[in-house]
Image: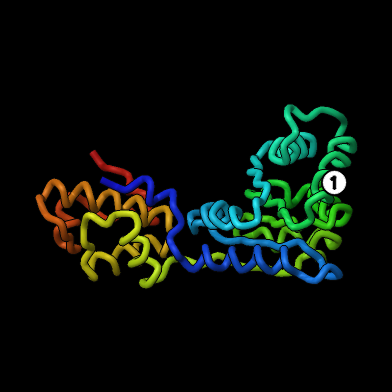
Amino acid sequence: MLNLNQVNRPAPLKNVAAFSTLMTKVVERQRHLPGMACFSGYSGYGKSRSAVYGAGKYRAAYVELEQYTTAKSMMQMILAELGINRPKGSVPELISQAIEIMAGDVYRPLIVDEAHYIASKKFVDVLRTLHDKSGAPVILIGEETLPKQLEAFERVHNRMLTWVQAVPLDAEDFAILARTVCPSIKIASDLAAAILQETSGNTRRIIVNFDEAEQRAKRLGTESLDLKAFMTFGPIIGNKAPLPRAY
């Protein structure tokens, strides 16, 4: 059975390490330097998990935006994460409350996940205001297009101390993740290589295939699985959707 506790626990993967380094850089920066940062990459690369794991060291406030997030709903989420119960007020009032709280602990970062949803909207500048007036770090996480989107807002763009791009899993990370997530079976090198190729190193899809591998190994009554055995019950779950069927 897939180890859910391990799935939700950090494995020492390259993206986890990269985000941890980013966090340290913005939190421990010299105070005359800007303290915003951007962590971007394709969906499924493990950006959000890396952020959640990395947030613990600095007690970061973490919010996740959505497609219909507004300036007010964003500020309400941020204040709730900062400890305010059911925040109320106009947008300027909410911003002032957040600045006051953040200024009281300038080593506590604010992480804004799924930031690409607001990166093309003018109120993305609110995040720059929070950073500038509080002195606290603000880290934006989003899809591969996020850095390009932010170019339209120079005052946000030039506050970035560092830009880090998440990377797909490689063979080394694959082996670490396999030992962490599904330690009950051994995945043969040919199956590992095929999963990496078919998923293009997408962490989320790889974990789905780990679950498939465990189920298929159980059906075969084995503790190790190679490509031929895995394919007995169907193909690797990769980047391509199933083809339409003809009747």
Mark 1 belongs to which amino acid?
Answer: Ile
Residue 12 location (% of width, % of height): 45, 65
Does residue 115 show up?
no
Does residue 141 show up?
yes
Residue 17 higher or lower than 142, as above or below: below
Residue 72 location (% of width, % of height): 79, 35
Q: Residue at x 82, y 55 (%)?
A: 131
User: Left or right: where does residue 230 sit relative to residue 137?
Assistant: left
Q: Locate the C terminus by quadrant.
A: top left
Residue 41 higher or lower than 64, as above or below: below
Mark 1 Cα shell of 10 Å, populated few (<14), some (14-19), many (≥20): many
| Camera-side residue of 59 and 66 | 59
User: Left or right: where does residue 118 sit relative to residue 242?
Assistant: right
- What residue does disc 1 label? 99
Furthest residue in direction left, as rendered? 221
Q: Residue at x 58, y 55 (%)?
A: 51
Residue 55 higher or lower than 200, as above or below: above
| Camera-side residue of 193 and 223 | 223
Q: Residue at x 64, y 49 (%)?
A: 113
